[in-house]
Amino acid sequence: MWTSVDFFNPVAMAIVLGYCVWALLLQVTVPAPEVTGTQTETGHVPVYKDNGFRCYLITMVGGAILTYVMKTQYGVSPTIVYDIYGDIMGFLLWFGVVVCIFLYIKGHVAPSGKDTCITGYPIYDFYVGTELYPRVFGVDMKVFSNCRFGMTVWPILVMLYALKSYELYGFVDSIWVTTVLQMAYITKFFWWEGGYYRSIDIILDGGGFMICWGCLVAIPSLYCAVSFYMVSHPVNLGPVLSLTILLVGLTSLGLNYLADWQRQTVRATDGNCTIMGRTPQFIRVKYTLQDGEVRNSLLLTSGLWGIARHFNYIPELALALSWSLPSAFNHLLPYGYIIFLTILLVHRSTRDEEKCSIKYGHYWKEYCKKVPYKMLPGVF
Ligand code: NDP
């Protein structure tokens, strides 16, 4: 267990930088069909290689093989990552800032396109980002920091922490419940990564400190805190509690996926689909791009999007609570993620409403009349 932080531990630096090189190589070499993101106000349509699920699978299978070889052939366990976790985070803290300074300067001197978001207030620009879609040698830096780094390091750490727990105590049901739920959530994320390119992180937030540093640093620390805590605080849940929490968590995951699927399907089919076995109800909307071009779209008002305007955030929170509960109630640390996520999603729902209200004008008002609640009917 680490007790002090070395910000320049060469082993920690080699692990992080080695992983970055691996992730970049996969991003560049793993083939996949192209998908497009949301058209920006300047009319630009970002194009992505939809190789997230493949990169994730290759990394996890490669990691499992590496673990087996290290343990059986060399007697070394990759759970060394747990032992020097403080140093890894110490390095990431300043490495993340260096990456963000680079992106800030890049947005000024060599922007990747017309979608710059420079206000002239340096601190604000550094925080939010100077470009919406910064690319370096064709690699989208937001996809790299969010998906290839943050979202992929998360399952690697969760599995390593479960392994560390196993090395210390043998099978402990609670850490496996939280591991299964987090792994199911992350696997769903990568299965759906093409849809993530149309989410608020990507279409609204620039490539700056908030998103890029957040994904490089907050995901490996805050998001993984439950599993990290549970290595040193094993809890025995018993089969009934374990299965109940698993069931609640997996149902929440299914609902969250269904909400994302409904929103995308109704638009992709122009309403020619069924939502929960029925013909979908929606409002046909128009919005205007910066160059004056008028575009059409749909706002779904039935299915899960008829319950509340951001009902999808409720199962997201229920799932996060499900994988936090197995840690019991002796410390606040394992609940750091769910507390953070609650604040983030409530704030995010407000930001999204502002964005949609400006974009859709009176159509948005019509939607709010039909679906009056933001997240939870009768409450908020
Ligand atoms: P949402 O899935 O809530 O989508 C919001 C966007 O969808 C709006 O900006 C609008 O975009 C469009 N939209 C809004 N209402 C409708 C409607 N009725 N019908 C069709 N389209 C509509 O965005 P998020 O990016 O917040 O969430 C994506 C996923 O990521 C969710 O599953 C969420 O739970 C998850 N998430 C996870 C987080 C985490 O840290 N764990 C953080 C945040 C989100 P347009 O301009 O295209 O109309």
Image (cartoon, rainbow, N blue to C red):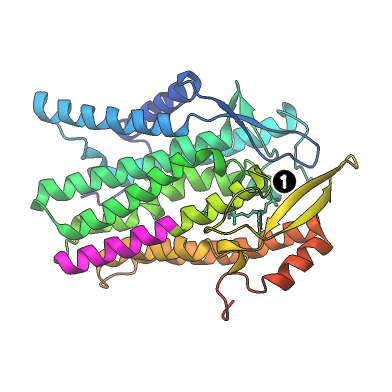
SS state under label 1: helix
**113, above or below 225, in the image:** above
Residue type at mark 1 is Pro
At x 48%, y 20%, the residue is 31
Q: Position of residue 183 (x, y in %)?
A: 33, 47
Instruction: Tell me if residue 296 can be seen.
Output: yes
- In the rendered structure, the answer to whether residue 345 lies left or right of residue 332 reads right
In this view, the residue farthest toward the bottom is 378
Instruction: Tell me if residue 289 can be seen.
Output: no
**161, above or below 316, in the image:** above
Main secondary structure type of the part rendered in magenta: helix
In this view, the residue farthest toward the top is 29
For label 1, count other residues whose C-alpha is less than 10 Å away and answer few (under 14), some (14-19) or many (20+): few
- Residue 13 lies in magenta, yes or no? no
Q: Position of residue 175 (x, y in %)?
A: 22, 56
Instruction: Please provide the residue range marked out in magenta.
Output: 239-254
At x 26%, y 44%, the residue is 159
Q: Report ligand 1 position as a quadrant.
A: bottom right
In this view, the residue farthest toward the right is 292
Q: Which residue is mark 1?
A: 122
Q: Quadrant of residue 190?
A: top left
Q: Position of residue 30 (x, y in %)?
A: 45, 21
The one nearer the camera, 167 or 302, is: 302
Q: Quadrant of the C terminus?
A: bottom right
